Image (spheres, rainbow, N blue to C red):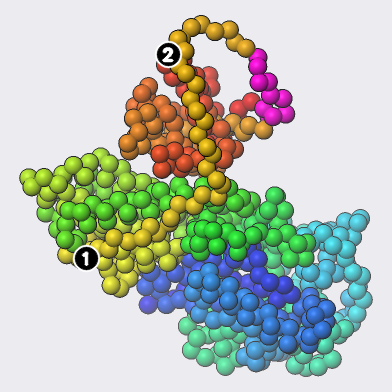
Amino acid sequence: MSTFYVTTPIYYVNGEPHAGHAYTTIAADALARYHRLKGDEVFFLTGVDEHAVNVYNAAIEEGLSPQAYCDKMAPIFIKLWERLNISNDIFLRTTSDMHKRGAQKFLNVLHANGDIYKGAYKGYYCASCEEFITEKELTDEKICPIHKIPLQWLEEENYFFRLSKYQDRLLAHIHENPDFVYPEARRNELLNFLESGLQDVSISRASLSWGIPFPFDPEHIIYIWIEALSNYITALDYETEGERYHTFWPADVHMMAKDISRFHALLWPAMLMSANLPLPKQIVAHGWLTKDGEALSKTRGIFIDMDGDIVTYGIDAFRYYLLREFSFGNDGDYRPARLHARYNADLANDLGNLLNRVLGLVNKNFDGVPEPTTPGEFDDEIKQMAQATAAKLDEHIKAFAFDAALETIWEFIRRINRYVQQTQVWTLAKPETKPRMGTILYNSLEALRFISVLISPVIPETAEKIQEQIGLAEFDTVAEWGRLPVGLTVSKGEPIFPRVDTKKAQQPQPKAAAKPKQKQELKTTDLVSFADFQKLDLRLARVLAAEPVEGADRLLKLQVDLGTEKRQVVAGIAEHYTADALIGKQVIVVVNLEPATIRGVESQGMILAGSGDSVVLATLEKEMPLGTQVR
């Protein structure tokens, strides 16, 4: 059996966890769950970093001892991870005896190998980063570049680690292993930093008693970053080098936000080289989750209302949004309006309505899951697409492209919706066509089972609900077509994503009496300012897919590609354009309209068109890159 060891950073307990911590932890959880699906033996570590100046100061402010403060804060993290359905195998606290003994053993090895020496340090220090700021990073204002707080000048006698000794080995390792640091932008940053030269680093503090004492000099405590990084092996019983250590080390993925990638990709590997231990296979540094362009920060008081959004939309919708909306290596701005749009369009409409529709047809026409006895048009395409989707998903997960992975699954979901529409299965209840109806509904139920397996790493509660509603007593984890037994009793089922309206519906306005058509002069009434016009964000997009909106003769549901994202738009152009004629066309989309629900379908923008006796889509004279702003 293959093994897979994934870690999050261990988080400071000087404040409560925020959405940035949740982002990292949910991504690591999705990886862990995906590898369990594949049959790997998984070990998933997360935890809290309790020995820090920040933690000590927070405890003093509350009138508590540091240990009492940590004992109060650690359960808050544990409770949140339970709430977010995080499947970690261990929650490590750095105040645990196992970690203390392991960290001291690790330091002894570095010392015995001649890589620790005593010296004096002078420099500017950020208490929030727990890091000295190098001369080349220092600004005239002496402000931390991350936390935007004044730096402190520190002078004290410290122990140092010979980081400079490993500069050439680190360079060679990163060049020889191009996937060691992901994404490429982080790798290039680290290579530039390496090539400018490494300095030895301070690894002890004599001015603070809160921490793990040096095993060979109890007057000093281990610098927090040296101690914290060792958690990745101390959690595996490194102290005794037990079975767990030999099974899972080296780690497959260390996952973190980009601001701490340097410690993980340079300092940690150098220490492991010193200790003659294998290096982790991959350092994965994702972008920041931001609010209004600012990185989330406990220090700076920049937060997202995570609790409010979870109450409104549910745990799975929150998990889905974080991994679907953003490209994992880049920064992503958290926008509640986009969460609302994703919820209604992707979850409630595409997936939830598909499940409800298929279950309703089965309940109305069959006693249980029908037998697939009568193959027909589109069936083979559906089966082939299912397996292709699973294969693509594996490629995307290996590349940490969670957004692309979910879009691949949703392409299959939208295809099953179209399959139900194309076959007009609801019209086949007559005796002579009922066997074909049963086959179509079986395929649709099997597709839902298949989908539930694929989505389970990201939205596990939803996956379980789907399988329960189609009649499976135990969760089936195998993404192979045809495993759904016939005869199962499907449930009527509550909607898995009930529609959420965050604003009161506007009252309909009375229609004016119809007037005879006549040529009218263009009047410049109801003028808007140029500033108001500039608020419209018009972007060039390409139509990827189009289909009629059920029960609406004038409406088409379009999937459009804006270059950086894909959206669903409802357009009232069905009387003038067929769905097939639109595919591939470049169109202009108003992308900053609030999402609207039209005939039960979420629309995330508006297509521009000229309207008179006929309707003509607005476009550009020649093709331009998708996402180009139209002015």
Asked whether residue 385 appears in the rendered view, the answer is no
Residue occupied by mark 1: 489
What stretch of residues is rendered in magenta? 524-534
Q: In what element is the residue under mark 2?
A: loop
| Residue 278 to residue 18: above or below | below
Name the residue at 91% across, 56% down.
Answer: 141
- Image quadrant where one finds the C terminus: top right
Name the residue at 50% across, 71% down.
Answer: 85
Determine whether, in the image, residue 516 is placed left or right of residue 191: left
Kind of residue sitting beneath label 2: Asp
**Along the line of sight, the residue nearer the viewer: 259 or 520:** 520
Residues at badges 1 and 2 in contact (C-beta under 8 Å)? no
**Relative image position of residue 351 (x, y in whole percent):** 38, 52
| Residue 112 to residue 75: above or below | below
Determine whether, in the image, residue 1 is placed left or right of residue 224: left
Q: Was residue 529 drawn as part of the magenta stretch in this picture?
A: yes
Kind of residue sitting beneath label 1: Thr
Asked whether residue 525 appears in the rendered view, the answer is yes
Residue occupied by mark 2: 613
Residue 166's image quarter? bottom right
Name the residue at 42% across, 66% down.
Answer: 461
| Residue 322 to residue 631: above or below | below
